[in-house]
């Protein structure tokens, strides 16, 4: 694993700043209030708010993340902070999710954690479609992780009825 000094040398100042900002809880939670008040449409369909349940408390929790890939009946998001992200761990523990994106609010969704190979393939597609965003996002996540970040993908689909 590269030392943080090596990462600092190959990571731009803006990417390091982005990593620090993404580690600032109050800042990353700002969009949640807008989504809960019904103004999530302001963010378009590039972001999604995931309502999930705490794995111990079973209380509602919220996170807003970027959509990596969207298909007719699937939304995929990346856990930039890997499998240690609280929202990722909560979804893995209980699989309960409601999504708010665009004008859709609190839509129930089935949760599937993609394996490492599938995640890598989806991230490769994202990088090809959004090369500049990927360059900065991956650099910020690598810096925050202190080495090469493991970025798993979570897929949300309509629940089976």
Image (cartoon, rainbow, N blue to C red):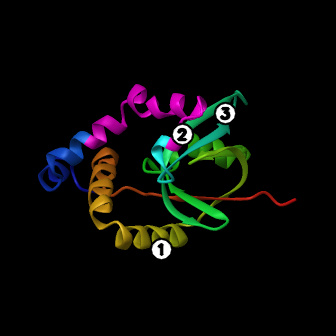
Mark 3 to mark 2 CA distance (whole Å): 22 Å
Q: CA distance from mark 1 to mark 2?
A: 29 Å
Q: Which residue shows up at 54% across the image and 71% down it?
A: 118
Which of pointers 1 and 2 indicates the residue nearer the eye? 2
Q: Which stretch appears magenta?
A: 18-41
**Depth-wise, is mark 3 or mark 2 nearer the camera?**
2
Give whichever of discs 3 and 2 has the lower sequence position: 2
Q: Secondary structure at mark 3?
A: loop
Q: Nearer the viewer, residue 124 or 56?
A: 124
Which label number is shown at residue 54? 3
Of the pair 141 and 63, the residue shown nearer to us = 63
Quarter of the image holding residue 28? top left
Residue projecting furthest to the right = 161
95, above or below 58, in the image = below
Residue 45 falls within the magenta-colored stretch: no
- Residue at the image point whose x is 29% and y is 49% from the top: 140
Q: Which residue is mark 1?
A: 121
- Magenta stretch: includes residue 19: yes
Residue at (72% x, 52% y) in the render? 109
* Element class at badge 1: helix
**Which quadrant: the N terminus?**
bottom left
Return the mark for residue 40.
2
């Amino acid at each position: 694993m590269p030392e943080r000094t090596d990462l600092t040398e190959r990571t731009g100042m803006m990417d390091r700043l982005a990593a620090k900002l993404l580690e600032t809880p109050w800042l990353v939670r700002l969009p949640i209030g807008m989504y809960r008040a019904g103004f999530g449409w302001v963010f378009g369909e590039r972001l999604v708010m995931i309502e999930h349940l705490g794995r111990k408390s079973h209380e509602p929790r919220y996170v807003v993340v970027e959509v990596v890939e969207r298909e007719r009946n699937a939304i995929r998001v990346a856990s930039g902070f890997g499998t240690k992200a609280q929202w990722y761990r909560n979804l893995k523990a209980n699989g309960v999710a409601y999504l708010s994106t665009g004008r859709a609010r609190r839509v129930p969704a089935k949760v599937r954690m993609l394996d490492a190979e599938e995640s890598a393939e989806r991230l490769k597609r994202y990088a090809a479609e959004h090369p500049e965003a990927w360059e900065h996002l991956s650099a910020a996540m690598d810096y925050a992780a202190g080495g090469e970040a493991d970025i798993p993908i979570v897929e949300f689909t309509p629940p089976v009825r």
